Image (cartoon, helix red, strand yellow):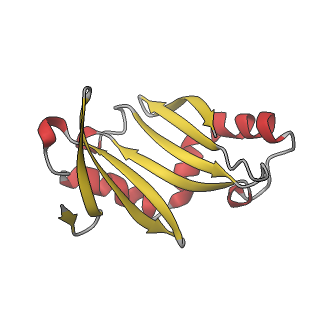
Amino acid sequence: MAHPVLGDLLLMRTKSGAYWEGETGLGGRPLTLAIEAPGEAEPVPAQVAFFERYVHYPEAAFHKAEDLLVGEYEDWVRRPFPADWREAFAWVALSIPADGDELKPWDLSFECLQDGTARRHFTCFIERGHVVRVEVSG
């Protein structure tokens, strides 16, 4: 499906339900999208608004996750977190919950720019509006 705001999307069906997958650009880098699709429905206006709220203000994505993200960064990289979060991370993925409801589970992923060639991904899981855990992969 070609969405006028979210771009080209592909419907993915899994055992736990369906979601739309796509990729958009953000500051010259790709940003992967996963949009919940209850009943295989197309994205609703509230999901588009959710997307726009974060993409037009990427600092909001970092601030949503920073409470746990900064500590994980310092544990992995073994140095203080820089004053500008963009020196530490590139935001690379966003999931958008059903109905664009921030209180439902969703997540953000950041690629670490300071861990050499590993380029680990720090995925921040958000529930009830707050980051509850960070998983590091790569």
Front residue of 64/114: it is 114
x, y percent for residue 88: 73, 54
Q: Residue at x 54, y 73 (%)?
A: 28
x then y, percent, for residue 100: 29, 44
- The quarter of the picture where residue 32 lies is bottom left
User: What residue is shown at x 61% (from left), y 36% (from top)?
Assistant: 137
Apparent side of residue 136 relative to residue 16 in the rendered image (left or right): right
- Image position of 49 with respect to 104: above or below: below
Q: Looking at the rendering, which quadrant does residue 80 occupy?
A: top right
Residue located 49% across and 63% down the image: 30
Whole-percent x and y of residue 119?
68, 50
Q: Nearer the viewer, residue 57 or 24?
A: 24
Position in image of residue 39 (x %, y %) = 12, 36
**Quadrant in which the N terminus is drawn:** bottom left
Is 50 on the left or on the right of 119, as rendered? left
Please tell me in which quadrant of the rendered image residue 79 appears.
Answer: top right
Q: Residue furthest right?
A: 79
Q: Quadrant of the C terminus?
A: top right
Q: Is residue 109 left or right of residue 37?
A: right
